[in-house]
Amino acid sequence: MLYDEAVRQLDRGLDLLQANVAGKRDPGKIEAIGKTMVKAQEIITELMVSLDFEQGGDIAKNLFSLYTWFNKELLEANITWDIKRILTVRNMFNELRSAWAEIVAKTVAEGMGQPSSGVNIAG
């Protein structure tokens, strides 16, 4: 669910940013763009603190590094209105979301577990 919401926030921010860059800068849209970026960063931070480094091992460490990079990129993108940076993070986030969905589907198909309401990304 967090992945879905992060992608949704980044999509909304991209839409607002592209509309604002194309037209006259609207202070209301500028604030809304900032809020979407901050919301995405808050979600990423929540994902970071939920990682279990003891059980997750290298996967948890690699996800932590990736999430740190995502937050850095979004911070810079929000300051400079860099659509390319936001799009890069959004696409990578979407790929991670798809990978976790595939893992869950495989696990269920192989009878290794029951489907749950979410994916435990803590490791």
Image: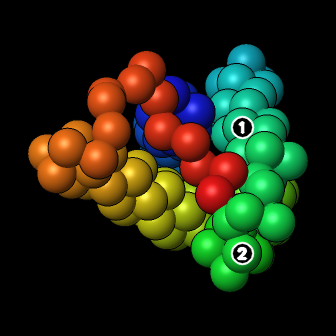
Q: CA distance from mark 2 to mark 1?
A: 22 Å
Residue that appears at 48% across and 39% down: 119
Residue 86 at least partly seen? yes
Residue that appears at 72% across and 46% down: 47
Indicate the amino acid at tag 1.
Ile
In the picture of the structure, the residue carrying the numbered disc 1 is 43
Q: Measuring from the top left, give residue 118's x and y in whole percent.
A: 47, 29
Quarter holding residue 113 = top left
Q: Measuring from the top left, give residue 1's x and y in whole percent.
A: 50, 28
Q: How does the figure colour the protein chain or chains?
A: rainbow
Residue that appears at 59% across and 49% down: 121
| Along the line of sight, the residue nearer the viewer: 24 or 79 | 79
Rendered view: 50 above or below 48: above
Residue 81 at least partly seen? no
Looking at the image, which residue sits at the far left? 109
Mark 2 or mark 1: which is in front? 2
Residue that appears at 85% across and 47% down: 49
Whether tag 2 and tag 1 are in contact, CB under 8 A, the answer is no
Mark 1 Cα within 10 Å, few/some/many (few <14, many 20+)? some
User: What is the total number of numbered labels drawn onto the structure image?
Assistant: 2
Q: Which of the numbered marks, if any, corresponds to residue 57?
A: 2
Q: Is residue 4 left or right of residue 46?
A: left
- Mark with earlier residue (2, 1): 1
